Amino acid sequence: MGMEIQEANNNLDVIEHQGRVYLAFRTAPEHFASEQTQLYVLSSTDQQSWTLETSFFLGTDLREPRFLSLDDALFLYFAVLGDDPLSFEPQGSRVSVLQDGTWSEPVAIFDEAFIPWRARVVDGVPMLMGYSGGGEMYQQEGVLPAIEVKWLTTAGGFDWSALHANKETVHIGGGSETDWAFTPEGAVVAVMRNEAGDSGGWGSKICRGEPDAVAHWSCVHDPKKYDSPLVFSHGERVWLIARRNVTETGHFDLQMRDLEHSQQTMAYSLNYWQQPKRCSLWEVDPQALVVEWVLDFPSRGDTCFASLLPAGNGRYTVYNYSSDPAGDDLSWLDGQLQPTQIYKQDLIFPF
C-alpha cells in the first residue's frame, strides 16, 4: 500500500496511543471538495519516521478526521461530504477502529447531518462535540439558521448519547465548529465558529457552562471568526488555536445590517476569502468570555486546522497545515487553490 500525496494537504488530527503517535490527514488536488480525496493514517514512535497505517477513498470528499483512544482501541471518525467544490454537502460520518494491530473497514455512524468536530477523554469520560444542520449553512433564505451543537459520550465508541441527561444539544443558532476546555473549578469554556450568523451577529460565540450545569451555556458574541477552533487549558488558563483574519480589525462581521441575513452571510464570506490569514494562539478569559491574540505560528495563505500533543514541562507539539510560511502573503482563496503542506511546530509556555 503506497501513498499518493496531492497538492492540498490539510484537515488533520494527531494522538498518542499505546506508545505510538498517529496522524490522520486529508490530501486532494485543492482545498475544495473533490472526488479524488484520500484520507491517510500514519504512525510513528519518534515523530520523525512515519509508517503508513491505512487509507480511505470513497470517491467523494472526506474531512474532519478525529481520533479517540478508548481502552485498547483507537477510533478514527471522519465526515463524508459531496464532490461539488462550491457546496457543503454532509453525507454522514464513518468510523474505523484499530484493534489488535488491524484497522477495520469504515462503517456509518451518527445521523447523516452530523459532523464530528472534537473528541477526547476527560477524567476517564469519553466526550465528543459536533454539529447537525451544517448542510444549510450557506443556503439560508428568510430564516435564521438552526444548527445544533451537540455534546455526546459513549461507552464503547460506537453508540453515542447525550453527555448530560436530556441535554444532547447545547446550542442552536449559527454556530458549528465548537471546542471546549474545563477550568480548574469545573466550569466549561467553549469557542464556537458562528459563520452562518444569528440574532447576535456573525463571527464566533464564546460560551460558558457553570460547574453545576456545564451543559447549560451562556454565550457572548465575538465579531472575529475563529475557524477550526482548538481549545485547551494550561497553567489554569484557557487557550485557543484558530485562524486569524489579517485585517485592521480582524472582524468577520462587517455590520452590513441593511442587507438581509443570507446576503450578509455571503458578503462577509466573500470579503473573508480575499484576506490573508494566519494560524494563531489566543487566550480566552473564562469569566469575561473575551479572546485576546497572543502570537502567530509560522503560517500564511490557506492555514489553520491544528491538533496538538502534550510533551510535558509546558511544551506542546502542534501539527498544522499551511501554504508556504516563507512564501507570498496570499489571500485565503488564493491559498486554497495552491499547494499546502503539514507542519510540526513546538509551542512552549514559560509557566
Image: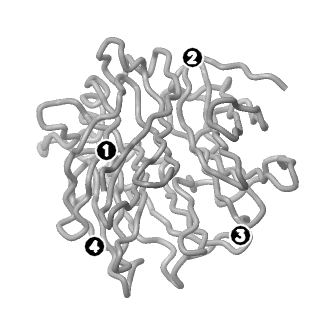
Q: CA distance from mark 3 to mark 2?
A: 36 Å
Residue 214: % across, % down? 39, 79
Q: Residue at x 42, y 71 (%)?
A: 170
Residue 26: % across, % down? 61, 32
Q: CA distance from mark 1 to mark 2?
A: 26 Å
From this view, report whether residue 161 is shown above or below residue 3.
below
Q: Earlier in the sequence, mark 3 or mark 2?
A: 2
Query: How many labels, in total?
Result: 4
Residue 219 falls left or right of residue 231: left
Classify residue 328 by image quadrant: top left
Q: Amino acid at mark 4?
A: Ser
Q: Nearer the viewer, residue 323 or 333?
A: 323
Residue at mark 4: 218
Residue 292 falls left or right of residue 175: left
Residue at mark 2: 7
Q: Secondary structure at mark 1?
A: strand
